[in-house]
Image: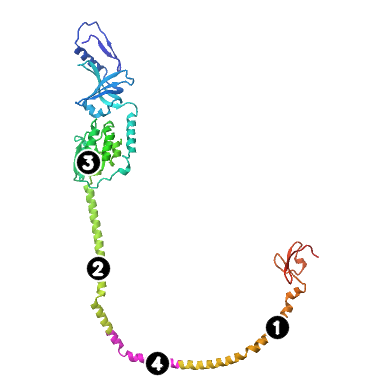
Amino acid sequence: MLAGKYRYNGPMSFFYQSAETDDRVFSVAQINRQVKELLEEGVGAVWIEAEVSELTSARSGHIYFTLADERGDAQLRAVMWRGYAQRFGNRLQRGAALRCHGRLTLYEARGTYQFVVDRVEEAGDGLRARRLEELKQKLLAEGLFDAQRKRPLPAYPICVGVVTSRSGAAIRDIAKVARRRFPVRILLAHAAVQGASAPKEIAEALDRLAQRGEPDVVIVGRGGGSAEDLDAFNTEEVVRAIARHPRPVVSAVGHEVDVTLADLAADRRAATPSEAAELVVADAMELRAELEASKRGCARALAAQTAEQRRRLDEASSRVRARDPRLQLRNSALFLARARQSLGGWPELWLLRNRERLRALDERLFAWTQRLDRDRARLETLAQGLSRWPGPAMREGRARLGTHAASLEALSPLASLSRGYAVVRRASDGAVVRDGAQVEVGQDVDVTLARGALQCRVLRQR
């Protein structure tokens, strides 16, 4: 052991406190082991913010990379073991600014220390959200999220495709709900739902289901998780696979708070895989109730239609019976029998009545003939007198007319006007002025002469 000891002096700060001088000789392995323990116990878990460079993915699934400061004046070798690489490996990109969490250790075989990373976050506030928003706007501009692209889910699917992990809780929840609601066939396309390979596997699983063409609808998702666990469903690869799928796709990521790009691209979104199964698989109980209601409705409609057809048949039967020739012949025979009975002595009675009417008409005609002869004689007498009347009557009338005209001429006011007189009327009301006091100075008057008329104004009175 080293004679002195290291004393921890806060995060990333420690110094070596020497004891008495020790002349012992150590091997390289011993020194490296002591330094490893010093790093692991003295520093502990830390966060390091840096840029990624020299990224290498090993066949074993481990990822080796280098963390460097922004100015490039310091570097640190780092490794992410396979288990963590499956979850966070897709975030490790050359030149990416990241915040890495892990522990410092020493690789004893080479005497180099390294940073073992177990968690990765994007560096800078809102960087991850900004990149996600940029991808969202890009896909939105291409129309992959348009409402017009959304397809309705089939009412009664026979086969339901599921893209998820075979070992996850999502497939169990979907199968449980489906068995309870309706017997459908579930076709599982296994894919990792988190980690670096998840986006590619999910897209390939969707394409495999599309090639088979068996599913009527597809559910893609996982059984919940943190926001980081949903990264696979926020990738362009998965969104395009959902958009190009020929069948309706239901996204069931299982994280109700966050809406992923896969949710926006899918035809329907479900909060959980169980809810997706309820959306996709019809409820047998509800279907049975609908069938019973339809059955009752059909029975009522059939009964009503049967009653209507029976009524129409009765009406048609009545019309047919009414037009039966045998019935018409019986009615005609009955009518003739009654007519024959009623006729009996009808012709003699009819002749007697008409003979009396003719006698009465003959008497009336004779009386009218006599009256007509008297009126004709009277008209002839009047005509003879009228032929002698016009001459003397006209001469006598003309003489009376001349006498009346002379009298009228003597009494006419026009005769007075012709002798120089005039008729004066007030212009305001047309009253005849017989006295000077009836008008005032300046008032207009109308003067009527034997020929013509004058409009005058009174200048003075005398």
- Asked whether 359 falls inside the magenta stretch, the response is yes
Residue at numbered disc 3: 210
Nearer the viewer's eye, disc 3 or disc 4?
3
Along the polypeptide, which appears first: circle 2 or circle 4?
2
Please identify the quarter of the rendering in which residue 295 is found: bottom left
Classify 10 Å Cα crowding around label 2: few (below 14), some (14-19), many (20 and above).
Answer: few
Along the polypeptide, which appears first: circle 1 or circle 4?
4
Rounded to the nearest angstrom, the CA distance separating label 3 from label 2 is 58 Å
Along the polypeptide, which appears first: circle 3 or circle 2?
3
Rounded to the nearest angstrom, the CA distance separating label 1 from label 3 is 129 Å
- Secondary structure at badge 1 equals helix
Q: Which residues are magenta?
A: 337-364
Q: As drawn, is 314 to the left or to the right of 403?
A: left
Residue at numbered disc 2: 313
Residue at numbered disc 4: 356
Contact? badges 3 and 2 (CB < 8 Å):
no
